[in-house]
Image (cartoon, grey):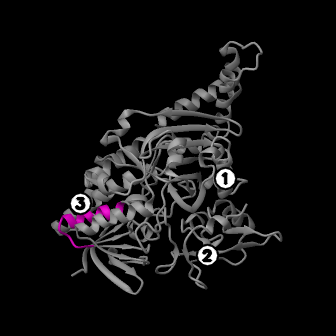
Amino acid sequence: MADFDAIVVGSGCAGPIAALELARAGKSVLVIERGNYCGAKNVSGGRLYTHSLRRVLPGFAGSAPLERRIVRERISLLAETSNTTIEFTDAAMRQPEFESYSVLRARFDPWLAAQAEEAGAEYINGIAVESLIKQDGRVTGVQAGEDAITAEVVILADGVNTLLAGDAVGAPAPLPDQVAVGVKQVVALPASVISDRALTSDDEGAAWLFVGEPTHGGVGGGFVYTNRDTISIGVVATLSDLVGSPTPVYQMLEDFKEHPAVAPLIAGGEVVEHSGHLVAEGGYDSLPPLVGDGVLLAGESAMMCINAGYTVRGMDLAIAAGMHAGRSAAAALTAGDTSAQGLAGYRRALEDSFVLKDMRTLRRFPAFMEHTPRLFQSYPAMAGRVMQKLFLLDGNPVRPLRKAVLPILKQAGYTKLAGDALRGIKAL
Amino acid sequence: MNTDTYLGKNKYEVDEGNPHIRLVDSPPPAEFGKLVRACPAGLYKVGADGAGTFDYAGCLECGTCRIAASGTVVASWRYPGPTMGVEYRYG
């Protein structure tokens, strides 16, 4: 007889939700989290789309430590001397089903873990699972320090840098073009200053994505999220591209913070934390097997993450995957079959949900970005040159717009532009 | 720039004398250079004499060096021991 019905490795977004679902189904479940407290090892951009959380914990908004409801989207083409931005705001961003919030994981994750504990999940903190216990190829438990703990099913929610997925399901380590390096700083400022700069109230905030200069023209981008009394600012650069860059990634962030279009936003603020995190960017085609004998993978440990350029998501996928993992594991436990076959309902549930539907829809986007260097290198400056023709006046006679603008586009090449636009749209 | 001032803002419990990342002996400079650029903590450095240095104490535990250079620069990579390593207060 196993020590627990289920063991969950990792308490980020997927882990506690899986544990919560198992506990709700009356199963005994142990969560092992290597951080001294949940969230101590966790980093995200971060912005949480709440639709999947709402499904599991409908009353979350009353108690979850959320930062600001995002009501302003900005996406910018940042060039050396210019910045061209699209801004979007809509009353619908305040409708429950569309709500998203900035979050800080060291505050959010302990709350999420507490929900699982309240439902009956047990927790061990401060120790990493070093290896899986296997019998005849089947996962039967985990080794954490001196302790060997057994379970009928193990759920790996141990993050993108999982050291266990290989042994669990034979997943190879991600390739350098399937991950991006994220470097982020949290900058403290008074809440009212942040609201003024973001043009929001104190409870609401902005999400701002940048392409171009943040990565010095490499594949990736920059981000800014306003929190309650801090701003999260960072750069994400695809690893395969970054290793050949002349500029180290932490220097990219420093340059990004000093860009004239960005610097006023954080002026006078104090950096209170410097963090790093890998981002799974390989998309649908980089997914490992999600199920093995006695084991399931959920969240980033299974490369569940979507970068569509204008939206970047991981936490809402992890929460939904955790929910399905917990439910499928509970059903398999009840049926008395936690083999890969008995757990196969998990994969089907994910295929039927937005998690794998969205990842499948956008499966060609990672390759599009990787193979369209102009997106990062030349288009931001080109957009700036077009805007110059619209907005800069020095008293010289203005030229008709088509005569002023078309040569700029022609320089980039009409065919290339049209081709990139078409391929981009197809990939989305 | 170097990252020391920023890393000084973070909270760490350093497992003195017990590195969780071990490097190979004399890694190829080109491979080492990749980590100089990719490590978000800037812990892989090349000195004026061209020699590479690495200090695990400021590690953010992201795994970038594991993915970029397992076998070429990084000989072994594991998570820090119980209660050790970085402890994010914001995340």
Circles 3 and 1: CB atoms closer than 8 Å:
no
Picture layout, residue A39 above or below residue A196: below
Say which element carries label 3: helix
User: Does label 3 or label 1 sit earlier along the sequence?
Assistant: 1
Residue picked out by circle 1: A252
Q: Residues within 10 Å of mark 3 (few under 14, many from 20)?
A: many
Q: Looking at the picture, which amino acid does disc 3 mark?
A: Arg
Q: Main structural element of the magenta stretch: helix, strand or loop? A: helix
Q: Residue at x 40, y 48 (%)?
A: A101
The residue sitting at the right extreme is B49
Circles 2 and 3: CB atoms closer than 8 Å:
no
Image quarter for residue A26? bottom left
Labels 1, 2: one chain: no
Q: Which residues are magenta?
A: A14-29
Residue picked out by circle 2: B57
Q: Nearer the viewer, mark 3 or mark 1?
A: 1
Picture layout, residue B86 above or below residue A66: below
Q: Looking at the picture, which amino acid does disc 1 mark?
A: Met
Q: Residue at x 66, y 23 (%)?
A: A391
Q: Looking at the picture, which amino acid does disc 2 mark?
A: Ala
- Chain to which mark 2 belongs: B
Quarter that holds the N terminus of chain A: bottom left
Residue picked out by circle 3: A327
- Chain to which mark 3 belongs: A
Q: Nearer the viewer, residue A206 or A376?
A: A206
